[in-house]
Amino acid sequence: MNTQNLSHAKLLVVKVGSSLVTAEGRGIDQSALNNWAKQIAHIKQNGVDVILVSSGAIAEGVKRLGWAKRPTAINELQAAAAVGQMGIAQAYERAFSQHGLHTAQILLTHEDLSDRTRYLNARSTLKTLLSQNIVPVINENDTVTTNEIKLGDNDTLGALVSNLVDADALIILTDQRGLYDSDPRKNPQAQFISQIAANHPNLTQMAGGAGTGVGTGGMYTKVLAAKRAALSGANTVVASGRETDVLQRLSTGESIGTLFTSELSRVNARKQWLLGHIQISGSVNVDAGAEQALLHKNGSLLPVGVVRVNGHFHRGELIAVLNESGAEIARGLANYSSAETAKIVRCHANEIADKLGYAFEDELIHRDNLALHW
Ligand SMILES: Nc1ncnc2c1ncn2[C@@H]1O[C@H](COP(=O)(O)OP(=O)(O)O)[C@@H](O)[C@H]1O
Ligand SMILES: N[C@@H](CCC(=O)OP(=O)(O)O)C(=O)O
């Protein structure tokens, strides 16, 4: 999105760090969670969807286990995360219940976001939860990740979730006001930066590591997250989670914290993202009605418009869409494999479950996962 504030955003990903969630490791800060829940409930009433990415499982687990400090052994970190995540989930459910809202716990790994099928499944689950007015609360699935495949910090996870759901903006709440030109804990003269392009060449140089023993990535991973979110056209704000009504005020367009702007338009960014990441696995030919719907009506590709399936592809893979004369008009992520698609060619949405015994989505390629004219 190219507007310079978040007032037009319809879908926000909000990431809160360990130091905020656990009061710098002292234990879950229920009043802070209550406060964010109150703000998110308010934002949702204005028609904006919110997905939370919350850290804090390890810090809370370390406290519950009575350990003096954060361990370094992976198995101990995993055990701590498993213990602490129970507290995190309960605390959010309690906070949102005060506003008549339910939460859903989603634990993701790196592989879930790089594997095409799991990617689509995660996306579909999140979209369904939002349609049911649920607040998804996401963390990394620390139990099954090792150092090599760990996302490591939830700033990266926040950015990947923003790419996944095509969010308008990523808001990263932390214990600083935003980005300074050097670490303010080390340099009292550090200058605050209120807005900067996410692809600014000096960004990573300004950002240092974590400020407390509780957080992991520091400003460096927040800057990398802003760069990654910008790839799908999302702006990022890094702001203090302790600023009064920070989420509500950001969502009404107030300038708080540091805004990292994406230079890409949403549509172009999505196309680049789709096309940069994946090889084509097969194609389908569509009839003239479907071609019209895709090119001129901003529509999704429905099975009813498909006339032929070519090649072999799995659910989640990139396929080309060809018109009746074989010219390529679009590319997109298929919700059904080639074998499944062959069975539902020319079918209406309500016939898919009869033909297959199950149905994922109504569309073969959802509009959001489609890039035209390539
Ligand atoms: N250039 C910078 N601007 C602001 N903060 C910075 C900068 N460089 C490093 N930091 C540090 O990053 C810390 C926030 O990151 P981190 O401790 O990982 O928190 P969180 O748990 O919220 O992710 C700040 O407390 C600050 O000391
Ligand atoms: N999954 C981990 C998050 C890792 C972490 O410390 O992240 P962050 O505090 O955002 O730098 C946890 O919940 O403890």
Image (cartoon, grey):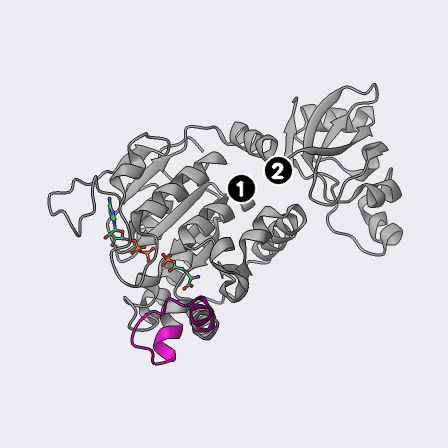
Quadrant showing the N terminus: top left
Residue ranking furthest to the left: 189
Residue 166 — which label?
1
Say if 231 sits above or below 115 in the image.
above
Say if 62 sits above or below 305 in the image.
below
Is residue 335 in view from this perspective?
Answer: yes
Circles 2 and 1: CB distance less than 8 Å?
A: yes
Disc 2 crowd, CA 10 A, few/some/many (<14, 14-19, 20+): some
Magenta segment includes 66: yes
User: Which quadrant holds residue 125?
Assistant: bottom right
Quadrant showing the C terminus: top right
Magenta segment includes 349: no
Residue 336 — which label?
none
Q: Is residue 127 left or right of residue 300?
A: left
Q: Which residues are magenta?
A: 61-79
Identify the residue position indicated by label 2 in the image.
Answer: 368
Say if 46 sits above or below 374 in the image.
below
Disc 1 crowd, CA 10 A, few/some/many (<14, 14-19, 20+): many
Q: Secondary structure beneath disc 1?
A: loop
* N-term mark: 2 or 1: 1
Q: Is residue 1 left or right of residue 131?
A: left
Splitting the image into four quadrants, where does ligand 2 fall? bottom left
